Structure formats: structure tokens, C-alpha cells
Amino acid sequence: MSDPMPPALTIVHADDWRVVADKPSGLLSVPGRGEHKQDCASARVQALYPDALIVHRLDQATSGLIVFARGEAMQRALSEAFAARLVDKRYEAVVQGIVEQDRFEIDLPLLVDWPNRPRQKIDPAFGKPSLTRVRVLHRDAAGGVTRVELEPVTGRSHQLRVHLLAAGHPILGDALYAPPDVLARAPRLLLHARELHLPAVLDAPALSLQSPPGF
């Protein structure tokens, strides 16, 4: 029996330079290996805008805003903006436990956990510098969970998921990192790319978009 198709991808903005889509949880950003993993955000966007090229990725389990460049020149320009940390991104998540501090930073180096790929791990000796800013949005004392806003200053693979786990607050529904009881508390990973602020590059003006999470 084949896996059910993820919900529809929504185009939230399109102009001569960029396409921004709202990716559903469960949809790959780019094609995977094998014929059954060809359905992805980039393929769906390119079916509508053939010149759209991937600039960054979201984990398959993560929902939210993902930007595509129209043409190679814009892809290079936006990729350089991401590398220079000129793109402002905000995520929203629901995590296990009551987060005590209103605002704090998680500064822990990350490295791929090779025997357990695609998992990542904290590695003080060989990990790449990784920084996440956390702000509490709401504490649910009755439910024993906290809704947080996350700003990934760096963009490492699984950074938000591993950093929150290391802080003692795994994200609900995280099939890779959450313990079984926390995984069982949500039908999907409760992590959503909520805000995206793109700088002006080439002839394209600055762009700010928001997408409220569906959880």
C-alpha cells in the first residue's frame, strides 16, 4: 500500500523573481531516491513555474514557507543572501515541558551522526557552529507544553529539532528525536516555518511574508 499523498502545496507569493510556497508537512522539498519519492515541493512549483529553482530546504516533516528563485541569476543571489545571513526566518513549534526562560539562545555545535543518518548530534569537538534564538509565546501549564518562536541564526540540518532536544524540550511529534511519549502527543512534527523576510537582491524588492501554523 502506497503512502498517502501529502496535502496540497499553496503558492503564497509569485513575482518575476521569486515564488514562495507554503509546504505541507510530509512533502519533501526536493526529490528523494526512488520513483516513489519524486513528488516534492520543487516539482510541484516547477509544474507551475518552470524556471523556479530551489534556494533552501525544509525538512520533510516541517511545514511552512519555502522560497524558490526564478532563474539561475536570482538563485545565486538568494543563495548568497542566505549564506550571508541576510534572510530572516522565524519558526513556531510546540515543545514538551514548560520552558522557564522567556528568551534565550542555544549555542551548540552540530555534526551528522553518521551511523544513524540522517540524524544529527551535538559534537563540541568537530561540530559546526550552530545558534538558535528562542522566545516563549505561550506556556500551557495544564498540557505541560510550551509554544515557542525560533530564529535559526545558522541553518544546519535539523538544527531546531536537535537544539530543543538538547535544551530538554523536544518538539512534539518528532519521529527522529523525541522520546516515544512525546512523539505520540502529536500526529506530525509541530514545527512550522512561519515568517520569511527576504532582502532586496538584483532587481527584486525586499519581501516579507507570514504563514500561521495549522497547529
Image (cartoon, rainbow, N blue to C red):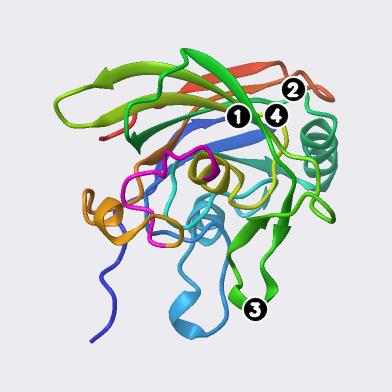
Report the Cα–Cα distance between label 4 and label 2.
Answer: 23 Å
Task: Give SS at disc 2.
Answer: loop
Amino acid type of disc 2? Ala
- Residue range corresponding to the magenta coloring: 166-175
Amino acid type of disc 4? Val
Which numbered mark, 2 or 3, is in the foreground of this view?
A: 3
Q: Earlier in the sequence, mark 4 or mark 2?
A: 4
Report the Cα–Cα distance between label 2 and label 3.
Answer: 43 Å
Q: Earlier in the sequence, mark 1 or mark 2?
A: 1
| Residue closer to the observer: 95 or 157 | 95
| Residue closer to the observer: 63 or 171 | 171
Q: Please check the rendered image and state whether residue 83 is part of the magenta-colored stretch, yes or no.
A: no
Kindly check if marks 2 and 3 are in contact, taking CB atoms under 8 A apart as contact.
no
Q: Which of marks 4 and 3 is nearer the N terminus?
A: 3
Q: Name the residue under label 1.
A: 15
- Horizontal arrangement in the rendering, residue 154 relative to residue 25 (left or right): right
Task: Give SS at disc 3.
Answer: helix
Q: Name the residue under label 3.
A: 115
Q: Which residue is pictured at 69% across the width and 16% down the height?
A: 206
Which numbered mark, 1 or 3, is in the foreground of this view?
A: 3
* Residue 4: % across, % down: 25, 70
